[in-house]
Image (tube, rainbow, N blue to C red):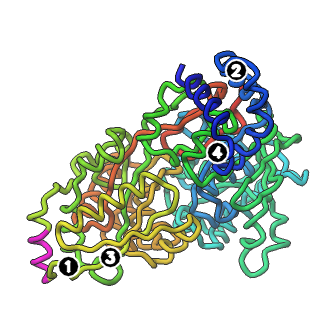
Amino acid sequence: MRFKDHWLKLVLLLILTAVALAGCNNYNDEETTGETEAESEEPAENNSSDSEETAENSNFNADVFNFATNQDIPHLDPHGSAANTSFRVTYMMYDRLVTYEGTSTEPQPMLAKEWDISDDGLEYTFYLEEEATFHDGSPVTADAVAYSYTRAIELGKSAAGIFNKVLDPETSFEVIDEHTIKIKLKKPFAPFISTLGTVFGNILNPNLEENHGDDYGESFLAETEVGSGPYILESWDRGETLVLKANPDYWGEAPTMETVNIRFVSEPSTARLMLEKGEIDLIDNTMISPEVLGQMEGTEGLNIQKSTGYQIDYMPMNIESGVLSDVLVRQAIAHSINYDALLESVYLGEAERIGGAVPAGMFGYNPDAKLYDYDLDKAKALLEEGGYEEGEINLEIAISEDNEVRSNTALLLQSDLSKVGINLEIKTYAWPTFLDLVTNGEHDFGLVSWTPDYPDPDYNLWYFGHSDSKGPGFNLAFYENSDVDALLEEARSNTDEALRAENYEEIQNVMAEEVPYIFVAQPNLQAPVRDWVQGYELNPMNTWYVPFDKITKVQ
């Protein structure tokens, strides 16, 4: 078997070069000590099997789940963060009125055990679980729901993009009794129930108000939590490990994992070795390149979990000023990219081209949205039409560190654009710094991955295209078009699915012509996991969501 062959070679290499290997990784330092002498007393063939079994047994703990990612968490406020790395954790510490289970994109009851919807689509009455409590023991009530949604709107960060057009903090919330709340919309909002299952729909303990300060408690929540979810934040050593502990008094189904360690491992090669040795149970599906995943196929003790998904890899261009405000430059760039080569060399065929912000497979997807051909002559002609000379345009592309797909994509883009005389400098940033940079509009280009929190084109297109979503709302192109705004608002407030689909398809056509974004690929989902892990499923919309509370480990 491949793993056994690898282990045999490693044992022999340790015997010959233990000193040289000792400096590679801290966990190698610990394991080489006192190991080689004992192993040399018996034939290497026998030691390979014994060593493998010992390593797996010593690293296996059915109650502890070790997850590796190379992107640190900016902060833990569910209403203020736009980072998927934060979402992964806050989903475990908080509950929502509804949730998504397994691979399903249909909302399921959570804190709301049932609900009624008025015929006009304006009133939603939710009946809450009576036994639900926050981590401090206080009950989850209708007042807590009203407080949470009101705070999300008043904080004015990412969550406000969902709620502020349809909810009014003064008139939308009517507490019927302790466990019943009626939510009144200002106008119909077709995906309303679906939105309540997003991270922005997390219900917070109203006692946070005691720590509001000048920022609605955002600074207080940066490193703590006030949830009712299946896990409690035990500790967080930034850049090292965040530890979640099972909530012993959880009102719902008891979480399966007693302890969850979110471990920050900067090098994908290190995470891969840790997975093969059983020190890690699962690696973040965004961390390992398709090339390395292909190399891992068939490794003993590992599985590569695969699924189709709604993830989009894309390039926002800051079009508010400079040369990127010229649509001719943006169209020229779109014609300069060798998309076929990118999909083959970077994604190894594990992705498809996409022409807009709605992924294939989702309602509202426009298969006829314009796709730009790789045409260097056309690109040069567009630049000449705009009055630009070769070598005149100098741009920067921002990427987050420790992401092989993005770094490889940036290198290919740099090479492609040089062929039409555009100079592209690659700048790499730590994830929190990168996020601040692009949401504050301090970038020319960025490379970003996007997955929707609810399976409706309203989610993607509102954030990508509505003028209210600029910057922190994740309209990273700072794009504004009054016609697009109007189409989005009409579709959002209408329950006629045919009208909504028509609006969304038209928006994709308009944005394809104006090119505020270049949509690089819709990749297939792949995640490397130990074969002793059971119950892990990739959700097509929440690709970064890991159901730690449902996973088990069986050796």
The residue where tag 4 is placed is 21
Q: Position of residue 239 (x, y in %)?
A: 69, 60
Q: Is mark 3 on a helix, strand or loop?
A: strand
Q: State the predominant SS element of the stretch in magenta.
A: helix
Task: Choose mark 1 or mark 4, whichever is in front.
Answer: 4
540 relative to 28 in the view: left or right: left
Are the residues flagged by discs 1 and 3 in contact, CB closer than 8 Å? no
Are the residues flagged by discs 3 and 4 in contact, CB closer than 8 Å? no
Q: Position of residue 266 (x, y in %)?
A: 60, 55
Disc 2 or 1, which lies upstream in sequence? 2
The residue where tag 1 is placed is 391
Q: Quadrant of residue 327?
A: bottom left
Residue type for callout 3: Leu
Question: Which numbered disc covers residue 243?
Answer: none
Residue type for callout 1: Gly
Q: Is mark 4 on a helix, strand or loop?
A: helix
Q: Residue at x 38, y 55 (%)?
A: 408
Are the residues flagged by discs 1 and 4 in contact, CB closer than 8 Å? no
Disc 4 or 2, which lies upstream in sequence? 4
The residue where tag 2 is placed is 47
Residue type for callout 2: Asn
Disc 1 or 4, which lies upstream in sequence? 4
457 relative to 385 in the view: left or right: right
> What residue range appears in magenta?
380-387
Residue type for callout 4: Leu
Q: Which residue is drawn at 23% across and 78% down?
A: 326
Residue 291 seen by the camera: yes
The residue where tag 3 is placed is 395
CA gap, disc 1 and disc 3: 11 Å
Quick one: quadrant of the N terminus? top right
